[in-house]
Image: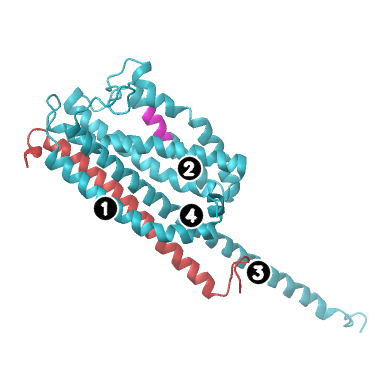
Chain colours: A red, B cyan
């Protein structure tokens, strides 16, 4: 762990923050996907169909 | 089948559904290789010491921040000129991702700047123009949120995106046009990179990893946006159907009285 000597705190902060922001962005996109799939399924289950979709 | 045939959202969903697992796998592979090289094979810089490792995440973040805005500007052209069905979806999906990468470029640069320059922030041309880029991303996200109708939001956001694109060459050439504290370009130079290959290789690997990550997130966000518009359209359809039923019931109520004598007539 030679890289943590000297300015290790700065390096850890930069990498840690990047992991946090990119992880949160990925998590948000996945959560949105699940939420939208649920909403779409609920609407289709209630009998609403897209006009362009073959019946 | 031409590339334009994939402009159809349903075809895009089918194609991206097949591509996404491969893109995700490649992203993980390049990120793992890039991080290993960044920490275990790259040597400390003779001037910057260990802090040079921050460059492996700072520079790719800044490259993606600019590339993403260029993609938004191209999508804006697609929205305004060709009315491409996926152009607006692409631009809207890219804006929050671009904002996140720009935020990271600013923050990791600031963290790198403190031990190297002795300051967290300086108002030099490069840093200020990247901060303007971050505000442009936030403006685009806010503009999309402020309209109910996606098509109207898309046209307004496309105009803002094209006007804001003037900032991208300013960011790129700011270090040449003005006397800045930020170092000049050391990779994308006409006379070749000015970095030793032991440091250049991890940097390029991380740049590929970040590019793949951006493509993966953008594709997934585009799929979300298509779903969001489908949900919106179905909800609209359901509201219209409910309104029609109510209107029919109202007419039916009047119709029941037709032909029946009123109290006075009776």
Observer-side mark, 1 or 4, equals 1
Quick check: marks 3 and 1 in contact, CB under 8 Å? no
Quick check: marks 1 and 2 in contact, CB under 8 Å? no
Query: Residue at label 4?
Result: B225
* B213 magenta-colored: no
**Circles 2 and 3 on the same subunit:** yes
| Residue occupying the far front of the picture | B1
Q: Position of residue B221 (x, y in %)?
A: 43, 53
**Circles 1 and 2 on the same subunit:** yes
Residue at (26% x, 53% y) in the render: B28
Q: Which numbered dot is residue B241?
A: 3
Query: Residue at label 1?
Result: B28
Residue B54's place in the image compared with B222, above or below, is above
Magenta region:
B129-135
Task: Determine the CA span between mark 4 and mark 2.
Answer: 16 Å
Quick check: marks 1 and 4 in contact, CB under 8 Å? no
């Amino acid at each position: 762990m030679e890289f943590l000597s000297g300015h290790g705190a700065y390096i850890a902060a930069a990498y840690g923050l990047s992991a946090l922001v990119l992880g949160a962005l990925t998590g948000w996109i996945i959560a949105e996907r699940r939420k939208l799939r649920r909403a779409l399924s609920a609407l289709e289950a209630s009998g609403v169909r897209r006009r362009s979709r073959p019946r | 089948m031409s590339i334009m045939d994939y402009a159809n959202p349903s075809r895009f969903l089918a194609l991206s559904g097949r591509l996404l697992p491969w893109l995700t796998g490649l992203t993980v592979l390049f990120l793992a290789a890039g991080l290993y090289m960044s920490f275990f094979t790259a040597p400390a810089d003779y001037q910057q010491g260990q802090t040079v490792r921050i460059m492996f995440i700072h520079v790719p973040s800044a490259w993606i921040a600019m590339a993403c805005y260029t993609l938004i500007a191209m999508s804006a052209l697609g929205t305004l000129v060709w009315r491409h069905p996926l152009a607006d979806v692409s631009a809207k999906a890219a804006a929050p991702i671009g904002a996140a990468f720009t935020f990271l470029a600013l923050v990791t640069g600031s963290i790198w700047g403190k031990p190297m320059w002795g300051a967290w922030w300086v108002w030099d041309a490069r840093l200020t123009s990247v901060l303007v880029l971050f505000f442009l991303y936030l403006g685009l996200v806010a503009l999309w949120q402020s309209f109910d109708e996606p098509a109207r939001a898309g046209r307004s956001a496309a105009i803002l995106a094209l006007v804001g694109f003037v900032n991208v060459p300013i960011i790129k050439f700011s270090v040449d046009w003005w006397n800045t504290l930020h170092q000049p370009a050391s990779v994308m130079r006409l006379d070749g990179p000015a970095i030793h290959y032991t440091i250049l290789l991890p940097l390029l690997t991380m740049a590929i990893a970040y590019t793949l990550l951006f493509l993966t997130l953008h594709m997934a966000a585009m799929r979300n946006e298509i779903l969001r518009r489908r949900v919106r359209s179905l909800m609209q359809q359901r509201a219209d159907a409910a309104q029609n039923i109510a209107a029919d019931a109202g007419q039916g109520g009047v119709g029941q009285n037709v032909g029946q004598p009123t109290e006075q007539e009776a």
